Each structure stands twice: as C-alpha cells, then as structure tokens.
C-alpha cells in the first residue's frame, strides 16, 4: 500500500507521517525524495531544498540575473549538475512514482495526491487545522515567538500555493481528491494514527 499525506503547514504532518509509517512498518519518504532528486539531477540537496523552500522563484531569479559561477558552484555538486523548475518537476514525478511502485511507503506532500491519482492501492490523506493552532504548533516545534510563528506559517501557506500553481493546480485542498480528511483541531495524533491504520487495514482486507 501507498499513503500520501498532504497538509497545511503546522498541522503536525511530519510527526504524524513518521508515526503512521512506524505503526505500519512502512518507509517514510520525505527528505529521501530530496536526496533522490539531487542524485538524479547531480546537484546538491541544498539546491533542491531551495526550490521547495521558495517554490522555485528564488532560484529562478538567481539564474535569470546571471549570478557568479562561484555562487553556483556553492550549490551544485559539480559543473555538470543543473536544475531548473521543469527538471525539478520532471524528477519529482518520476521519483514519487518510483517510491509508490516500491510500495509500503508514506509519501509526504509535494503534489503526490495528483502525481499518484489513480495509482493502485494508494490512499490519499489531507491534514488541516485552524491557523491559530498551526501557529501554536510552530512556536513549540521550532522554538520561536508567536510573531515569528505567524510569519512562518503565512510564508509556508503562500509557498505551498505557489508550488501547486507551478503544478497547474489550485484545488489542492478539495476533499474529493482524498480518501480521508483529518481535522487535527479535533483529533489527537494517536487517534489519527489509529484511524489511518484502520483505513489501510480495511483496504487490505477487500
């Protein structure tokens, strides 16, 4: 089975994703996806992270303004490696699909509900929460002030929207895209893990 987890930032997606993977004995695919994209494109993980953190815009501006070769060398593994938005998206689709084909995996975000739409034995999950709760979670998780947490959550919401825009999608929180939507304002993480495990086990028995 394959589980994709899409989430509003600060809804506890990483904690929950790892807990679900541990409960089911699945692989947890988050940073692994970054590493695999970097390997395929022959660039550093930092270069890939730049695309994900800024939805490609920062790196695109760097390239379009002809940054110095010294600066480029800091983020490329060697002079042969290169990454732009289209290459990133092409590798993203390839690697998410490969991870799904390997099976028994929890895949975090990155438009995986679109990439794996119709993929056999895949269940898509969306996590949501109130903005205030997401700010509180971020304050604790990142040990920052409330003002900083508000800024982080707002930035991440915009970044997420921008990334989906580059995928040509605007309905990324449409409930019809998912098999299960969990409002983490009303469900504790342990209960959420139990619900997801029941969904997967029920699917396996069919």
Image: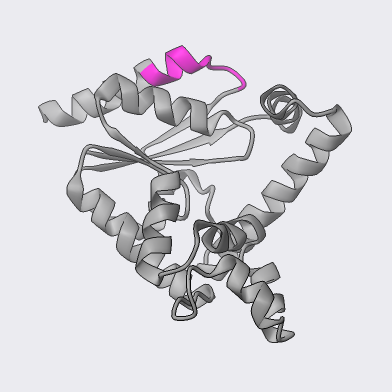
- Describe residue 56's horizontal placement relative to residue 131 as left or right: left
Say which quadrant the N terminus sits in.
Answer: top left
Task: Look at 40% across and 70% down and name the residue there.
Answer: 41
- Describe residue 10's horizontal placement relative to residue 38 as left or right: right
Asked if residue 189 is among those painted magenta in the image, a careful observer would answer: yes
* Frontmost residue, 180 versus 81: 81
Q: Residue furthest left?
A: 206
Q: For residue 162, what is the image quadrant? A: bottom right
Q: Position of residue 195 (x, y in %)?
A: 36, 20
Q: How many marks?
A: 0
Say which quadrant the C terminus sits in.
Answer: top left
Asked if residue 171 is among those painted magenta in the image, a careful observer would answer: no
Q: Is residue 74 above or below residue 110?
A: below
* Frontmost residue, 160 versus 195: 160
Magenta residues (range): 185-193
* Frontmost residue, 133 versus 142: 142
Q: Position of residue 133 (x, y in %)?
A: 71, 25
Q: Is residue 21 above or below residue 51?
A: above
Q: Is residue 162 above or below residue 18?
A: below
Task: Look at 62% across and 67% down and name the residue there.
Answer: 74
Task: Look at 43% across and 62% down and name the residue there.
Answer: 38
- Describe residue 108's horizontal placement relative to residue 94 as left or right: right
Does residue 200 appear anywhere in the picture? yes
Task: Look at 40% across and 61% down and name the residue there.
Answer: 37
Q: Position of residue 123 (x, y in %)?
A: 30, 40
Q: Is residue 145 above or below residue 59?
A: above
* Frontmost residue, 43 versus 96: 43
């Amino acid at each position: 089975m394959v589980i994709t987890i899409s989430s509003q930032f600060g809804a506890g997606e990483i904690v929950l994703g790892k807990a679900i993977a541990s409960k089911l004995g699945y692989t947890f695919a988050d940073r692994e996806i970054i590493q695999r994209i970097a390997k395929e494109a022959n660039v550093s993980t930092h270069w890939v992270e730049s695309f994900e953190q800024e939805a490609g815009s920062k790196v695109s501006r760097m390239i379009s303004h002809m940054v110095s070769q010294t600066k480029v060398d800091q983020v490329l593994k060697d002079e042969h490696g290169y990454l732009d938005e289209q290459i990133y998206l092409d590798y993203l689709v390839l690697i998410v699909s490969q991870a799904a084909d390997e099976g028994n995996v929890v895949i975090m975000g990155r438009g995986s509900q679109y990439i794996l739409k119709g993929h056999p034995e895949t269940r898509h999950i969306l996590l949501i929460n109130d903005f205030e709760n997401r700010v509180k979670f971020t304050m604790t998780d990142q040990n920052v002030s409330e003002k900083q947490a508000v800024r982080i959550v707002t930035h991440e919401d915009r970044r997420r929207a921008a990334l989906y825009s580059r995928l040509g999608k605007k309905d990324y929180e449409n409930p019809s895209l998912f098999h299960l939507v969990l409002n983490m304002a009303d469900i504790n993480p342990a209960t959420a893990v139990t619900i997801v495990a029941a969904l997967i086990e029920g699917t396996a028995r069919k």
